[in-house]
Amino acid sequence: AIPLSFYRYLYETVGAPWCWVDRRWMGDAELASHVHDPRVEVHVACVEGAPAGYFELDARKLASDREIELAYFGLVPWRIGGGLGGPLLDAAIERAWVMGRAHGAMDRLWVHTCSLDHPRARAAYARAGFVEYEAHDHEEWDPRPLPVSPR
């Protein structure tokens, strides 16, 4: 089980530029119930011994809906643009299908993204074989303090 302090470091470091906030509000018990569930896997990419990014696969719906969610995926800011994103995404997809086969079968691997994510996120997911299934307009407050510097 990944230590919660390390998970929080990854989540904050990778997600802060893209306004990831859901897990920031969770207490330790609630967060542990998610990331320490045996149907959830967190994989960390390291370069020269330091975390460079991670992905989280959530297979909790595999038994009922035969699907796995790529719940979180991203790189630390100083590794963006260095060619690591594509191979890490390929590793996430490959691991998801291995998980699906290990549990009998899987019909769908899916990921949520939004306009707050990296500007190239949707294109990267499309190159990896994801197709748009649904689109929703949703307004969310931006938790970053003003002024917000441009990305």
Image (spheres, rainbow, N blue to C red):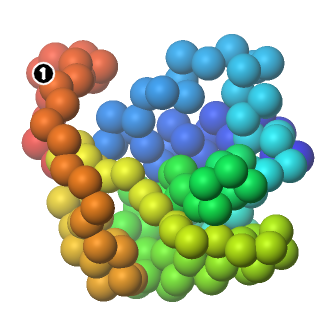
Q: Which quadrant of the figure has residue 83?
A: bottom left
Kindly state the secondary structure of the residue where label 1 is placed. Answer: loop
Between residues 97 and 32, which one lies in front from this camera angle?
Answer: 97
Name the residue beneath numbered marker 1.
Answer: 147
Residue 147 in percent (x, y) is at 12, 21
> How many labels sit on residues?
1
For residue 95, say whether it is visible. Answer: no
- Residue at 70% x, 63% y is 43
Amino acid type of the residue tagged 1 in the rendering: Pro
Between residues 149 and 16, which one lies in front from this camera angle?
Answer: 16
- Going by the image, does 14 lie left or right of 67? left
Between residues 89 and 52, which one lies in front from this camera angle?
Answer: 89
The answer to whether 110 is drawn above or below residue 15 in the figure is below
- Going by the image, does 63 lie left or right of 80? right
Q: Which quadrant of the figure has residue 133?
A: bottom left
Residue 129 in percent (x, y) is at 37, 83
For residue 106, say whether it is visible. Answer: yes
- Residue at 43% x, 75% y is 85
Residue 26 in percent (x, y) is at 62, 18
- Mark 1: few/some/many CA within 10 Å (<14, 14-19, 20+): few
